[in-house]
Image (cartoon, rainbow, N blue to C red):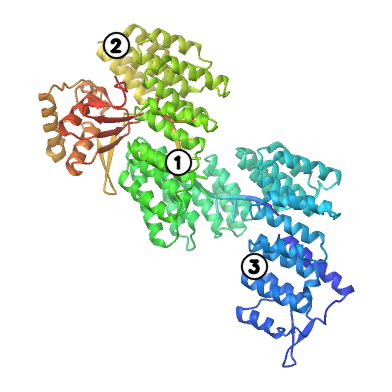
DNA sequence: CTAGGGTTAG
């Protein structure tokens, strides 16, 4: 609206020269001095009151620019109470007859977010000009009432007023906030009719409208048509690319802009930087950084936040930290970027130690934020809950739940979804269900979270009921929802139901199956021992079977003792040159147990060729806001540690009630290949569980996260431990959740390296 | 008019 007010002022001043309505350009004070009011003049709060009190009696006439100065100040400071004072004053001096003063007043009420007052004032105006109409429309659009804005536009046409190009730009913005392409197209037709599509403001608005509606091509066409493109035009076009997933195009456009000698502003630079981080191009981002310095925006808070985000998303935590420390002005976005950045690093470093270190670091930032006095918002809470879910920090998650409640963010559906997800991932389906039921709005994602949660906890019936309830409330499922639904069927061995849902998904919801769905279907056939059917299914898929599909099939073959098919599938798998260490471990296990040692060395050779790393295995347990991690170790040294000794005692106890240790592969040391097929009792998760049993209150379930899949031996062992200790033990491995209660596991006994 | 944080996936 900045250009509006300056236009209004210039227009008014021009008019002023011809028809002076008010007294001369200076106003005599009581002391006989003259004060002149200029547009740029600022008043301190005291002067402000004083300026008004001088004219309180309302005996003298006041010039327009007096009001413009005061109102400009009210507008800049968004001060509603001061605006009311000026308004009251204008009523006394008779300035309310002046359409320009009143239009400006409408604009200031709009800026203060008070649409009711703006409308009332507008309705009482003796005359309305295009500025007033436009201001009102823009006001509704900016104060989240875009529909009202469009109604006012029709009212304006009906009243016989002609919209200016600027009015049309403002109406387009209202369409953009409604994400209504249909309305936008209607106005576009109107714009073509009045030949204003070449206008800068109209073109800018068209560009951002089409971008918001996901029509990048139209947005760029609108941009190209603008005759006199300004920085805003270029910035709109560049960010349109970024918002529509065309970062490379956006960066090219940015280069074009630079080559045309258009100087970018902080908006352009932040948009470009965020596009760089989106496509992981630290290189380009670094070049943009030098431009930020060149154009003097390096210390701009928004620019700094984007730079910080760029570095943290590219894994340069050190540089992000350095930027953070160098900022003397920090806002919530800065904190959120640090927290979310660490959370994202956790995902990237999933299978190694730094993952949990990143999690702890992020939680430290969260407590620092809490101490800083800045209030966390829904973004902060969502991120932090995700971190708790990853490290299974239930206690901290509960504390954050309480904080969310106090801060009043519980009704936010995204925070609620994160909460449900956190409880699910921490293995507490009861609390997840409770949080879910307390939500007043249920989106597709929230339903999906809950369905998946039931499914992961082995509660197939509840998962399917959830899905039917979701359909009853007319929330449309997506591909992810069906991952949960199909998994529930697979888990309970409901073959026909699964096939039925698989068809409904495609025919009724027009969802093309992706690898996740195929994997579950294959997994289901395999669980039921229907290996031939599984193979037929794989052959009929409309995409090339992946590493994971074959792995699931091979695991099934081993489980059902059909090595013929297993060997066949292994050849298919090897021809794909797998990249995942766990895939190779599966094959090594299979060939080793079958005594096919030539194949064992063939697989090992291939691992070296493909530069597949060792199996990095870590387990973590959170106790009282602290995370403890354990590594699978070779059996020579842990005896010296207390925890190793306790684990040995536990193994001995389990053996006395029937536990038999199984042989499993451990690729710990490449130089000691021959030794790798020996039973290892010091699995990381076994150490973590032992630690948990000793350090948690006896009523407390033991919750452990593991970076790789559970092996058959561990799975069996933990069952015994759950019976012996009478404790609930929850282990989340790289693929699924295992909840052990009284010798039984929720996963249905079909897992990983079986 | 234009920018910077977030949720779901056996």
Label 2 crowd (10 A; few <14 / some 14-19 / many >=20) = few
Left-right relation of A159 to A739: right
Name the foreground residue: A635 vs A411: A411
Q: Secondary structure at mark 3?
A: helix
Q: Is residue A550 above or below residue A22?
A: above
Counting from the top left corner in percent of width and height, residue A498 is at 45, 18
Measure the alpha-carbon separation of dots 2 and 1. Answer: 51 Å
For label 2, the residue is: A598
Relative side of A221 to A293, left or right: right
Name the residue nearer the viewer: A128 or A77: A128
Instruction: Look at 41% across and 28% down and name the residue there.
Output: A463
Q: Quadrant of the C terminus of chain A?
A: top left
Whether the residues at callouts 1 and 3 have beta carbons within 8 Å, the answer is no
**Disc 1 on helix, strand or loop?**
helix
Of mark 2 and mark 1, the one earlier in the sequence is 1
Residue A158 visible in the current orientation: yes
Disc number lying in front (1 or 3): 1
Q: Dot 3, how many residues are within 10 Å of its Cα: few (below 14), some (14-19), or many (20+)?
A: few
Residue identifier under label 3: A76
Of callouts 2 and 3, the N-terminal one: 3
Q: Which residue is mark 1?
A: A417
For mark 3, name the chain: A
Residue furthest out toward the right = A18
């Amino acid at each position: 609206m900045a250009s509006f007010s300056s236009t209004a002022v210039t227009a008014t001043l021009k008019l002023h020269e011809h028809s002076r309505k008010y007294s001369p350009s200076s106003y005599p004070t009581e002391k006989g001095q003259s004060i002149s009011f200029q547009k740029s003049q600022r008043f301190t709060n005291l002067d402000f009151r004083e300026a008004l009190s001088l004219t309180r009696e309302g005996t003298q006439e006041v010039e327009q620019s007096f009001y413009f100065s005061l109102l400009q100040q009210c507008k800049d400071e968004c001060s509603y109470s001061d605006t009311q004072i000026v308004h009251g004053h204008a009523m006394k001096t008779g300035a309310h007859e002046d359409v320009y003063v009143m239009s400006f007043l409408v604009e200031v009420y709009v800026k203060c977010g008070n649409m009711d007052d703006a409308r009332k004032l507008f309705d009482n105006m003796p005359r309305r000009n295009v500025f007033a109409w436009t201001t009102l429309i823009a006001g509704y659009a900016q104060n989240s009432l875009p529909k009202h804005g469009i109604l006012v536009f029709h009212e304006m046409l009906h009243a016989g007023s002609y919209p200016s190009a600027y009015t049309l730009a403002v109406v387009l913005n209202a369409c953009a906030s409604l994400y209504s392409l249909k309305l936008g197209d209607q106005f576009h037709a109107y714009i073509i009719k009045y030949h204003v599509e070449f206008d800068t403001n109209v073109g800018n608005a068209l560009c951002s409208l089409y971008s918001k509606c996901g029509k990048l091509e139209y947005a760029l066409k609108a941009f190209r048509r603008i005759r006199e493109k300004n920085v805003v035009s270029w910035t709109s076009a560049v960010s349109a690319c970024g918002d529509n997933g065309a970062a490379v195009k956006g960066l090219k456009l940015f280069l074009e802009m630079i080559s045309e000698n258009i100087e970018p502003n902080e908006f352009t630079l932040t948009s470009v930087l965020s596009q760089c981080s989106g496509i992981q191009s630290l290189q380009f981002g670094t070049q943009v950084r030098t431009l930020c310095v060149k154009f003097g925006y390096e210390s701009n808070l928004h620019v700094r936040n984007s730079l910080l985000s760029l570095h943290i998303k590219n894994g340069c935590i050190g540089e992000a930290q350095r930027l953070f420390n160098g900022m003397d002005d920090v806002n919530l976005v800065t904190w959120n970027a640090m927290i979310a950045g660490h959370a994202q690093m956790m995902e990237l470093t999933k299978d190694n130690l730094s993952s949990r270190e990143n999690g702890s670091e992020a939680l430290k930032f969260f407590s620092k934020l809490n101490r800083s006095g800045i209030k966390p918002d829904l973004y902060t809470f969502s991120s932090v809950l995700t971190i708790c879910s990853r490290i299974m920090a239930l206690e901290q998650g509960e504390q954050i739940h309480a904080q969310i409640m106090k801060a009043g963010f519980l009704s936010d559906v995204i925070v609620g979804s994160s909460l449900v997800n956190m409880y699910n991932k921490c293995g507490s389906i009861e609390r997840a269900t409770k949080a879910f039921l307390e939500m007043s709005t249920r989106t597709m994602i929230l339903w999906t979270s809950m369905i998946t949660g039931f499914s992961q906890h082995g509660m197939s019936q509840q998962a399917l009921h959830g899905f039917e309830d979701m359909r009853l409330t007319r929330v449309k499922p997506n591909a992810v929802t069906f991952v949960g639904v199909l998994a529930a069927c697979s888990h309970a061995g409901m073959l026909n139901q699964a096939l039925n849902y698989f068809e409904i998904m495609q025919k009724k919801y027009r969802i093309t199956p992706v690898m996740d769905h195929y994997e579950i279907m294959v997994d289901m056939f395999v669980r039921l021992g229907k290996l031939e059917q599984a193979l037929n299914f794989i052959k009929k898929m409309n995409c090339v079977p992946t590493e994971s599909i074959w792995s699931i099939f091979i695991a099934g073959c081993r489980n059902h003792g059909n090595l013929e098919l297993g060997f066949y599938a292994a050849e298919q798998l090897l021809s794909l040159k797998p990249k995942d260490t766990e895939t190779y471990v599966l094959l090594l296990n299979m060939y080793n147990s079958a005594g096919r040692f030539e194949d064992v060395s063939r697989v090992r050779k291939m691992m070296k060729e493909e530069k597949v790393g060792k199996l990095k295995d870590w387990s973590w347990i959170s106790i009282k806001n602290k995370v403890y991690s354990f590594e699978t170790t070779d059996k020579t040294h842990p005896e010296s540690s207390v925890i190793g000794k306790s684990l040995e005692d536990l193994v001995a106890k389990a053996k006395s009630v029937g536990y038999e240790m199984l042989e499993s592969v451990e690729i710990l040391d490449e130089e000691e290949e021959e030794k790798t097929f020996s039973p290892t009792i010091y699995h990381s998760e076994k150490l973590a569980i032992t630690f948990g049993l000793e350090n948690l209150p006896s009523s407390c379930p033991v919750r452990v996260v593991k970076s790789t899949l559970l092996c058959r031996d561990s799975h069996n062992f933990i069952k015994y431990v759950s019976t012996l200790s009478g404790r609930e033990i929850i282990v989340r491995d790289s693929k699924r959740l295992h909840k052990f209660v009284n010798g039984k596991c929720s996963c249905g006994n079909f897992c990983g390296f079986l």
